Amino acid sequence: MIGRNDPCLCGSGKKYKKCCEGKNQVTSQNVFQDEIENVLQTFYSNYPERKDIREFMELVRTWAPKLEKKLHKELVEAVALDEYFFHQRPDIWQNFLAKTAKKALRPSMIELLKSWEQPIFFIGTVEDVQDDYFTAISALTGTTYHIQRESHKSIPLGMRVFAFLLPDGSNKENHVLAVSTLIFFHKEHAISFEQFTEAYKTSRLPVEQFTKENHLLLWEGLVENGYEGEEFTPFEQEVVEQLKAFMTEKAINNESFVALVEDYLIEKQPTARKAGAIAAGAVRFGQENDLFDQKFTVKEIGESFSVSPSSLNKYYQELNAFYNEKQLVNS
């Protein structure tokens, strides 16, 4: 076995600890993470089995009339699926884990699968955001979790979160990943989470029993509070819709530009009297940074969104500052 102070086997002439030791550790970790992802993907690709479809669809038919007036069918089915696997029929999930563990070769994977038997029902508030994890505190138990980020999309502090959580295999305390559905909610929906938490406290039931018996109550409260499955507030949605309409009209296609503007809206949460002022500022920002080919005068941009040049310039400057911040972080 090569020692940390021995010459590296790659032939660089450096000591192993100064050369490939870290790379090998990262590679091993990546293989393990790929294995974890493969296990979860295999489960959702193969279950529910044909014999269980009717039972699952019965659950969907129970939930749908209470939720589909605001939530699209795909979201209702997604949250009902996790309800089915982890509350209604946990035997399906647990049997799958047992079969997978028998085939697993890595001892660490076998141990991890044992820790996955009862996913954690989680609702909470984002308290901090790091590169690979965000920190959120459970509304029901007060426990702090470090949840794996699924993308580098901006996550504002104070957002509410819903997920079923599993240990992530890092062996770090309360470091977890979402089994499937990881949903963020704008602060305007905080009241729904507070009402669900209050119902839990009033019930005096163990948290596992309460969440199993009352999962639907959370989603009914969200729908009653106006949640429609949106990632943005209605105002933020209007900004994005106006921006996309302008881009369609002018035959501009740049998804990464739209994603940047969406990150700005989520992270900075700008306020304006008119959504068009922010959309217009975004267009000027886009052209000034050569993010699309066409050029427009500030007057033309303002007229397209029925806002004054001074109004749009405020948000153009804010977007510029936000973009520069991002560039510094990524450099």
Image (tube, rainbow, N blue to C red):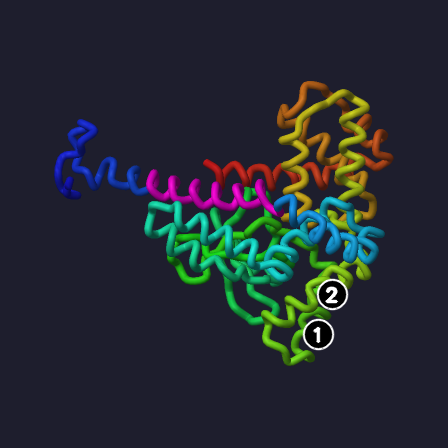
Report if residue 270 is visible in the image. Answer: no
Would you name the residue on which mark 1 appears?
199
Q: Overall secondary structure of the magenta stretch? A: helix
Asked which quadrant contains residue 241, the reply is top right
Query: In this view of the protein, which residue sits in the foreground, 166 or 101?
Result: 101
Give the amino acid at mark 1.
Ala
Q: Are marks 2 and 1 in contact (CB under 8 Å)?
A: yes
* Magenta segment boundaries in residue numbering: 26-48
Would you name the residue on which mark 2 appears?
217
Q: Residue at x 15, y 41 (%)?
A: 1
Q: Is 291 located above or below residue 128 in the figure? A: above
- SS of the residue at dot 1? helix
Furthest residue in direction left, as rendered: 6
Query: In this view of the protein, which residue sits in the foreground, 192 or 61?
Result: 61
- SS of the residue at dot 2? helix
Left or right relative to 6: residue 43: right
Q: Position of residue 17 (x, y in %)?
A: 21, 41
Q: Position of residue 226 (x, y in %)?
A: 81, 56
Q: Position of residue 9 (x, y in %)?
A: 18, 31
Q: CA distance from mark 2 to mark 1?
A: 9 Å
Q: Residues within 10 Å of mark 2 (few under 14, many from 20)?
A: some
Q: Residue at x 70, y 67 (%)?
A: 214
Query: In this view of the protein, which residue sits in the foreground, 122 or 23?
Result: 122
Residue 238, label in figure: none
